Image (cartoon, rainbow, N blue to C red):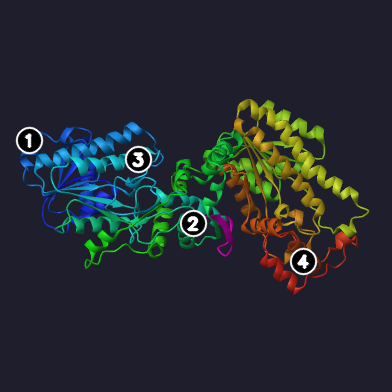
């Protein structure tokens, strides 16, 4: 017979699955409030004969809080006591809570095992018992541990010490590595260890194609083992004779550094890998006091916390980025010899682990991120809302329950769109506004503030595009003035007028529909890209000033979209583009998720290439410039002049760089 503490936990459930292959009753310690978990456990392991029996108790009470009646009934019948119950939470640094559960809980478990007259006490410790020992930690080592400031590490050492010094019956200790999901199913119920970096990998994958090579940190060691290996090894070693009074490392003989682990999972996720990894120990030449002082400067600390929060990586994990310990497991391998039980290579099951996480544990799966929740009852002002991207966006936010404010120059178009959206049930308000007229801009903001109480989301969508080479613009300075007036100064005026109200209400969002040209710097769009880049730069500078007021700026580097604005350029009839509905989806994504920027993979890659090798990119752009032609309109020819068709090479290149305005 067996008594298991923590039997309804992750490792416990898998261990009981193994024990079910043997004979005997399995008693599982549960609190009265957790008895429902026993039914789930029975169903999970297929316990049709009722071999799993709950025993009421409490880890924090003497002899596990098992009643005298139950102790008497079980005395002499329980052969193995498996103690797995413990608190493990790398984000939790509460000493008292972990000491009570892990240290005092072990003391109570030992006392209960002795009272039951068990033949062996099996204690589940952890590689954390080594603390921050530098070098190889053998299975016969204990007192050599190096203390760590995190309480969990000390509690695992101290709980082992209780077993070694106080347990009066034979004992065996198991030290698993970082336990991840089942190697065959990927199942796990908690995000921990390498899982903390999965969101980072996922975000990189969304930004860049897999063939891009990145620069990252190498870091210390991360010993990862799947739960099925841990459970099977514990089960086998527990039932093998002659192994009492020893510790067993249930670890991976392959010692991967953190950089390697990230690459293994990145490859499994079809994400870019870190081709160049810098060893974090290189920074140790900087005195610790200086490193500590720099990292605790308010701006550096705030920036670091913001990045970690965005990647959903707990800051506590950074303390172990240089984890120095490797684990020898020759005693475990000897005990498992001939059993067929061995730790599988991480690469062999990393894809299974990733797939289970992305399908079942990705935090985004549990967030309510609907457009309705983001805009219902809120005032959303959209400029250029009577056609193209603006109209498609207005349709979506109106359908989601927003108080949709549409702004455009033509009253007739405004009236038509307002009626169209209201016919579909939207709450719509139409205001005439000309972004080339500063007084018109001031008036619309004042009217909306007066009529609706303020603006929650401002979408700067209206804009003007000019495709003309600089050589054809020597006498067209007004093109640059008009483009800058509408795309920058008009939007800037709207922002400056909307910000006071947002600041007073302590919340709001500015969304700027910019251009992929801000990243790609393509020729023939000097006027357009300069105006959009000005708005980009302003918003990036202004955003930090309003972050503490809960006002967010989101810049969308919009790829080429099939709208009336690009109709004069006949080249675009031959190349792939987004449609307005797809573009509106990007804006809605910005409203829901409130990121700092939204970019396509191509735009991000081109921006990175310009930063790394501007000379090479300049040469490439020159070749592209000569590949395409100026339009008849740009050349100032007759309106009915036949547009010169692009070459097959130009069409092919435009298709390859889908979304870029060539």
Quarter of the C terminus within the rendering: bottom right
Which residue, given by chain and number where applicable, does mark 4 sit on? Answer: 624
Q: Is residue 546 left or right of residue 371?
A: right
The residue to which callout 1 is attached is 69
Which portion, as a residue range, is magenta? 207-218
Q: Residue at x 69, y 51 (%)?
A: 388
* Residue 463 picture location, percent across and down: 76, 47
| Structural crowding at the residue carrying mark 4, measured as other residues with C-alpha within 10 Å and reported as few (<14), some (14–19) or many (≥20) | some
Q: CA distance from mark 3 to mark 4?
A: 59 Å
Residue 152: give its label. 3
Mark before the other along the chain sequence, 4 or 2 = 2
Could you tell me residue 551's position as x and y percent? Answer: 62, 34
Mark pair 1, 4: CA separation: 86 Å
Q: Earlier in the sequence, mark 3 or mark 1?
A: 1
Mark 1 or 4 closer to N-term? 1
Of the numbered discs 1 and 2, the one sitting upstream in the chain is: 1
Q: Which numbered disc covers residue 552?
A: none
Q: Residues within 10 Å of mark 3 (few under 14, many from 20)?
A: many
Image depth: mark 3 or mark 1 in front: 3
Q: Position of residue 456 (x, y in %)?
A: 62, 34
**Structural distance between the alpha carbons of marks 1 and 2:** 54 Å
């Amino acid at each position: 017979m067996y008594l298991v503490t923590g039997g309804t936990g992750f490792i416990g459930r898998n261990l009981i699955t193994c024990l079910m292959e043997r004979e005997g009753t399995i008693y599982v310690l549960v609190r009265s409030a957790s008895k429902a978990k026993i039914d789930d456990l029975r169903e999970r392991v297929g316990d049709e004969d009722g071999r799993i029996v709950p025993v009421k108790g409490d880890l924090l009470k003497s002899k596990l809080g098992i009643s005298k009646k139950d102790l008497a009934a079980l005395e002499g019948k329980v052969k193995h006591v498996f103690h797995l119950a413990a608190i493990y939470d790398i984000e939790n640094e509460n000493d008292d809570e972990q000491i009570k559960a892990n240290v005092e809980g072990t003391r109570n478990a030992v006392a209960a095992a002795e009272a039951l007259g068990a033949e062996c006490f099996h204690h589940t410790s952890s590689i954390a018992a080594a603390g921050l020992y530098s070098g190889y930690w053998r299975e016969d080592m204990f007192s050599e541990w190096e203390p760590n400031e995190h309480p969990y590490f000390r509690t695992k050492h101290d709980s082992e010490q209780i077993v070694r010094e106080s347990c009066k019956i034979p004992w065996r200790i198991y030290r698993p590595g970082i336990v991840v999901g089942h190697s065959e199913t990927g199942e796990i119920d908690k995000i921990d260890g390498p899982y903390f970096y999965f969101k980072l990998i996922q975000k990189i994958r969304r930004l860049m194609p897999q063939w891009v090579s990145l620069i990252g940190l190498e870091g210390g060691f991360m010993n990862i083992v799947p739960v099925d290996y841990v459970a099977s090894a514990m089960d086998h070693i527990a039932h093998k004779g002659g192994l009492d009074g020893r510790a067993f490392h249930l670890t991976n003989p392959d010692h991967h550094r953190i950089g390697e682990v990230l690459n293994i999972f990145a490859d499994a996720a079809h994400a870019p890998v870190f081709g160049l990894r810098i060893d974090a120990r290189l920074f140790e030449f900087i005195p610790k006091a200086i490193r500590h002082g720099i990292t605790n400067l308010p701006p550096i600390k705030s920036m670091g916390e913001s990045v970690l929060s965005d990647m959903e990586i707990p800051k506590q994990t950074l303390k172990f980025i240089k984890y120095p310990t490797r684990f020898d497991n020759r005693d475990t391998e000897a005990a498992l010899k001939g059993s067929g039980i061995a730790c599988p290579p991480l690469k062999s099951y990393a894809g299974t682990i990733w797939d289970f996480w992305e399908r079942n544990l990705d935090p985004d799966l549990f967030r309510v991120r609907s457009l309705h929740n983001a805009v219902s009852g809120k005032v959303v002002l959209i400029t250029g809302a009577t056609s193209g991207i603006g109209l498609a966006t207005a349709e979506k936010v109106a359908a989601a329950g927003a108080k949709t404010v549409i702004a455009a120059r033509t009253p007739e178009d405004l009236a038509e769109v307002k009626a169209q959206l209201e016919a579909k049930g939207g709450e719509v308000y139409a205001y005439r506004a000309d972004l080339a007229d500063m007084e018109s801009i001031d008036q619309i903001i004042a009217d909306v503030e007066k009529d609706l109480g303020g603006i929650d989301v401002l979408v700067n969508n209206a804009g003007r595009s000019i495709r003309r080479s600089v050589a054809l613009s020597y006498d067209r300075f007004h093109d640059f003035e008009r483009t800058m007036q509408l795309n920058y100064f008009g939007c800037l005026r709207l922002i400056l007028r909307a910000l006071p109200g947002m600041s007073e209400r302590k919340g709001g969002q500015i969304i700027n529909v910019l251009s992929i040209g801000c990243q790609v710097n393509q020729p023939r769009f000097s006027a357009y890209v300069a105006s959009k880049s000005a708005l980009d730069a302003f918003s990036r500078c202004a955003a930090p000033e309003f972050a503490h007021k809960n006002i967010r700026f989101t810049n969308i580097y919009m790829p080429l979209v099939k709208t009336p604005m690009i109709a004069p350029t006949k080249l675009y009839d031959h190349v792939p583009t987004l449609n307005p509905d797809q573009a509106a989806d990007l804006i809605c994504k910005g409203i829901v998720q409130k990121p700092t920027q939204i970019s396509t993979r191509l735009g991000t890659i081109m921006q990175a290439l310009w930063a790394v090798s501007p000379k090479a990119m300049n040469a490439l752009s020159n070749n592209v410039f000569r590949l395409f032609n100026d339009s008849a309109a740009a050349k100032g020819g007759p309106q009915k002049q036949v547009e010169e068709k692009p070459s097959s090479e130009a069409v092919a290149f435009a298709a390859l760089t889908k979304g870029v305005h060539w």
